[in-house]
Image (cartoon, helix red, strand yellow):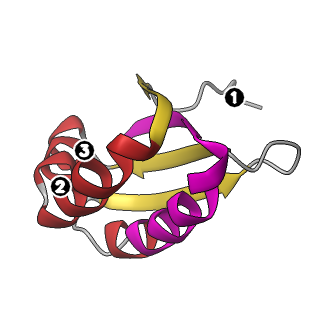
Amino acid sequence: MLTVIATYRATPESAQTVADVLARHAAISEQEPGCRQFLAHQAVDDPARFFLYETYDSVEAFEAHRASRHFKENIEAKLASLLIEREWHMCSAPLRTEP
């Protein structure tokens, strides 16, 4: 399992557009094979800041997501130019101890 955590910061005037696109993108992304969860959040104290929490079955499933038509249309074509910052990290499965 792979978790991806991303943070986006939009220009203040584009925050609502980014929120709308991310809502649609998250819904489509969760339908992909290998995507277990795709959550997009907007910060309460700074509406221009967004946090994405994505879970995939594998690195290959995440790579397929990034190669998808909707990723290219929503993230690369629509959102990238509206963002001041964009950062993401691939993380291992959650760390847990056995009870």
- Give the SS element for disc 1: loop
The residue at which mark 3 appears reads as 62
- Give the SS element for disc 3: helix
Residue 31 placement, left or right of 53: left
Instruction: Name the spot of residue 4 as percent of width and height, x first.
Output: 44, 36
User: How far is mark 1 from mark 3, CA to CA?
Assistant: 28 Å
Tags 1 and 2 in contact by the CB under 8 Å rule?
A: no
The residue at which mark 1 appears reads as 98
Dividing the picture into quarters, in which one does residue 58 lie? top left
Nearest the viewer among 44 and 65 is: 44
Vertical order, 82 against 21 (above or below): above
Magenta segment boundaries in residue numbering: 1-25
The residue at which mark 2 appears reads as 72
- Give the SS element for disc 2: helix
Residue 20 placement, left or right of 55: right
Nearest the viewer among 51 and 16 is: 16
User: How far is mark 1 from mark 2, CA to CA?
Assistant: 40 Å
Quarter occupied by the N terminus:
top left
